Image (cartoon, rainbow, N blue to C red):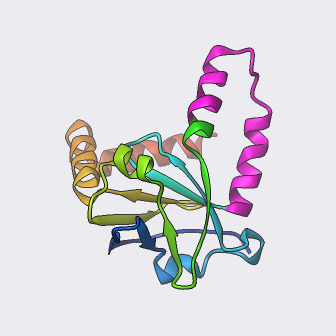
Amino acid sequence: MSVYFKGSDTHSIDSKGRVAVPAKMRKQVTPEAKETFVVTRGVDKCIVAYPLDEWESYSENMRKLNLFNPKERYVINVMNMWMDEIEMDAQSRINLPKRLQEFAGIKDKVLVVGMINHIAIWNPEEHEAYISKLEEEQPYEQAVQQVFEMTRHE
């Protein structure tokens, strides 16, 4: 079975930093993930959470990066510096590290967005600002047309 996270949900985050993984997304987590997510800083102002088995396949690509190349070393350094393995608790919540919450500007609510092989966890206002900024730069319809036109020619 191949993972495919889709949709979005808004949830509260409790005082201990725990947030529920939406039921429709939990169903996508395979037994090989062992109820565990690898969380790290996203490339946008969000937290990304990969099921453990998805992260393991992703990390194989990271292992191929050259530690003597400054740009590749930088990516490895930052991604690993922020990384943590988080097990879901009995209520299907994950505990988001405080420093990641601060990076993403997360306070009392989160927007959990399915991103195919992982989920992105946003401060809802940050996500709205992110989408608005992109929409101003290029309307969604044009972006979709461009992206799918490019993939057709590959």
Q: Is residue 34 above or below residue 125?
A: below
- Viewer-proximal residue, 29 or 96? 96
In the rendered view, does 107 fall on the left or right side of 103? left
From the viewer's side, name the closer residue of 56 and 86.
86
- Residue 75 lies in what quarter of the image? top right
- Is residue 31 or residue 105 the one in the foreground? 105
Left/right placement of residue 62 relative to residue 149 reads: right
Q: Residue at x 27, y 59 (%)?
A: 107
Residue 51 rendering spot, x and y as whole percentages: 64, 64
User: Where is residue 68, by image quadrant?
Assistant: top right
Point out the stretch of residues depicted in magenta: 52-78
What residue is rendered at 34% in x and 69% in y? 13
Residue 136 lies in magenta, yes or no? no
Residue 47 rendering spot, x and y as whole percentages? 45, 52
Q: Is residue 13 above or below residue 83?
A: below
Count of labels shown?
Answer: 0
Q: Quadrant of the C terminus?
A: top right
Q: At 32% from the left edge and 45% from the top edge, which residue is drawn?
A: 142
Q: Residue at x 78, y 71 (%)?
A: 32
Report x, y in % for residue 131: 27, 50
Locate the N terminus and report the quarter of the image it occupies. Answer: bottom right
Most extreme residue toward the front is 16
Image coordinates for residue 129, horizontal then vertical, percent: 21, 48
> Main structural element of the magenta stretch: helix, strand or loop?
helix
